[in-house]
Image: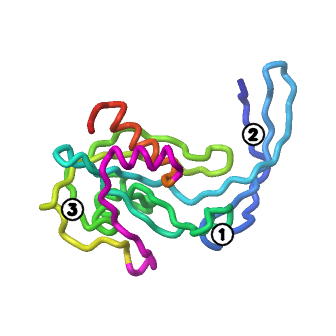
């Protein structure tokens, strides 16, 4: 177990979009030896994600949009199928996800349920993600969705049967971790 962490130096390497810092620190191992390491940590803020589901139809609402990092890493189209998600900015997780749901999917939800929270890439990114689920029906569709225009989002809204969504994980059409986690959550907990 590592204890006695002492940050020696923090350098900002980039603050163009979010903040990339190089942190040099010392820590003491169980045998008493002190070690020095430098690591980079990317701070993009914390976020929230939600899976909308319809028990009667056995469907879920997902989104599809271009993700540059996946394109750079070999995703030929750069398109990703995901649950609705967004950064908290100054909001609490519940307020954020209700707003993001309306912006991205066009559905207005009021009753969301937090199911867990997780660090998505703790070796390099500071972000903690808050995971939610909520029921939806056609009466909740109050807008077209597609994302916030000022954020230059270009999001397709997809209504997919749960069995097809699970097959999409199996065959690789869904590769987004937060989406896989929430789809598995509703299956493991017999919600759909």
Q: Examine the rendered structure and indicate whether residue 30 appears above or below residue 132.
A: above
Disc 2 to disc 3, how far (Cα)? Answer: 46 Å
**Sequence-wise, which precedes: disc 2 or disc 3?**
2
Quadrant in the picture for residue 33: top right
Question: For residue 161: magenta?
Answer: yes
- Say what secondary structure mark 2 lies in: strand
Crowding around mark 3 (Cα neighbors within 10 Å: few <14, some 14 to 19, many 20+) is: some
Position of residue 124 measured from the top left corner of the image (x, y, whole percent): 67, 50
Residue furthest toward the top? 31
Q: Which mark is residue 15?
A: 1
Q: Examine the rendered structure and indicate whether residue 28 appears above or below residue 173.
A: above
Residue drawn at point x = 41 percent, y = 38 percent: 184
Left or right of 58, for residue 163: right
Position of residue 9 measured from the top left corner of the image (x, y, whole percent): 78, 52
Q: Examine the rendered structure and indicate whether residue 144 appears above or below residue 181.
A: below
Mark 3 highlights which residue?
A: 108
Q: Which mark is residue 188?
A: none
Which range is magenta? 149-172
- How many numbered markers are drawn? 3
Q: Which mark is residue 6?
A: 2
Question: For residue 163: magenta?
Answer: yes
Disc 1 to disc 3, how far (Cα)? Answer: 34 Å
Residue drawn at point x = 44 percent, y = 62 percent: 89
Disc 2 to disc 1, how far (Cα)? Answer: 24 Å
Crowding around mark 2 (Cα neighbors within 10 Å: few <14, some 14 to 19, many 20+) is: few
Q: Are marks 2 and 1 in contact (CB under 8 Å)?
A: no
**Sequence-wise, which precedes: disc 2 or disc 1?**
2
- Say what secondary structure mark 1 lies in: loop
| Front disc: 1 or 3 | 3
């Amino acid at each position: 177990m590592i204890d006695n962490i002492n940050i020696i130096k923090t350098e900002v390497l980039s603050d163009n979009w979010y903040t990339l810092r190089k942190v040099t620190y010392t820590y003491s191992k169980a045998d008493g030896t002190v070690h020095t390491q430098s690591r980079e940590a990317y701070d993009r803020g914390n976020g929230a994600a939600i899976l909308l589901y319809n028990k009667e139809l056995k469907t879920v609402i997902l989104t599809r949009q271009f993700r540059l990092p996946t394109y750079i890493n070999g995703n030929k189209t750069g398109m990703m199928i995901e649950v609705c998600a967004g950064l908290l900015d100054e909001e609490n997780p519940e307020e954020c996800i209700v707003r993001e749901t309306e912006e991205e999917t066009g559905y207005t939800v009021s009753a969301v349920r937090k199911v867990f929270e997780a660090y998505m890439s703790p070796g390099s990114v500071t972000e903690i993600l808050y995971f939610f689920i909520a029921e939806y029906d056609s009466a909740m569709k109050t807008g077209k969705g597609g994302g916030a225009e000022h954020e230059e989002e270009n999001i397709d809204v997809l209504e997919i049967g749960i069995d097809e969504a699970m097959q999409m994980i199996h065959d690789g059409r869904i590769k987004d971790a937060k989406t896989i986690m929430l789809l598995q959550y509703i299956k493991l907990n017999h919600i759909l």
